[in-house]
Image: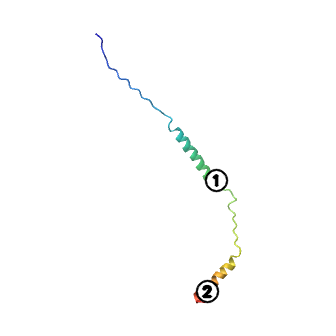
Amino acid sequence: MADNTDRTTTTTTTNTGGNTGLAFIVGILVVVVAGLAYYMFADGGSGDDVSITIEGAGDAVQGAAEAVEGAASGN
């Protein structure tokens, strides 16, 4: 007589590498942010000597002072 035995075979498939693209993109972003931080905080030397000149501001201030004085006295 034949002896029948039931056998169960389980196959597990593991897919890896799905996060490789995401890790690559995150790596690129880290390098870009580090480069921008270096560029912004590096001691370039050219940004230290800023000169701003406003010409004709004295006349405008004088006129504004006279207008305020006239408004305060009611003239």
Q: Position of residue 37 (x, y in %)?
A: 60, 53
Asked if the residues shown at circle 1 and circle 2 are in contact, with their CB atoms under 8 angstroms apart, the answer is no
Vertical arrangement, residue 40 with respect to residue 72, above or below:
above
In this rendering, position of residue 8 left or right of residue 30: left
- Give the residue at the far front of this rendering: 75
Vertical arrangement, residue 26 with respect to residue 48, above or below:
above
Report crowding for label 1: few under 14, some 14 to 19, many 20 or more residues within 10 A (C-alpha). Answer: few
Query: Mark 1 highlights which residue?
Result: 39
Vertical arrangement, residue 59 with respect to residue 13, above or below:
below
Q: Quadrant of residue 53?
A: bottom right
Dot 1 amino acid type: Tyr
- Give the residue at the far top of this rendering: 1
Q: Residue at x 58, y 44 (%)?
A: 28
Q: Position of residue 19 (x, y in %)?
A: 50, 39
Q: Give whichever of 51, 57 is nearer the camera.
A: 57
Residue 69 got which mark?
2
The CA span between labels 1 and 2 is: 50 Å
Q: Residue at x 69, y 78 (%)?
A: 58
Secondary structure beneath disc 2?
helix
In this rendering, position of residue 10 left or right of residue 62: left
Q: How is the image coloured?
A: rainbow
Residue 18 got which mark?
none
In this rendering, position of residue 56 left or right of residue 23: right
Dot 2 amino acid type: Glu
Q: Sequence-wise, which precedes: disc 1 or disc 2?
A: 1
Which quadrant does the N terminus fall into?
top left
Secondary structure beneath disc 1?
helix
- Give the residue at the far left of this rendering: 1
Q: Position of residue 43 (x, y in %)?
A: 66, 56
Q: Residue at x 41, y 26 (%)?
A: 11
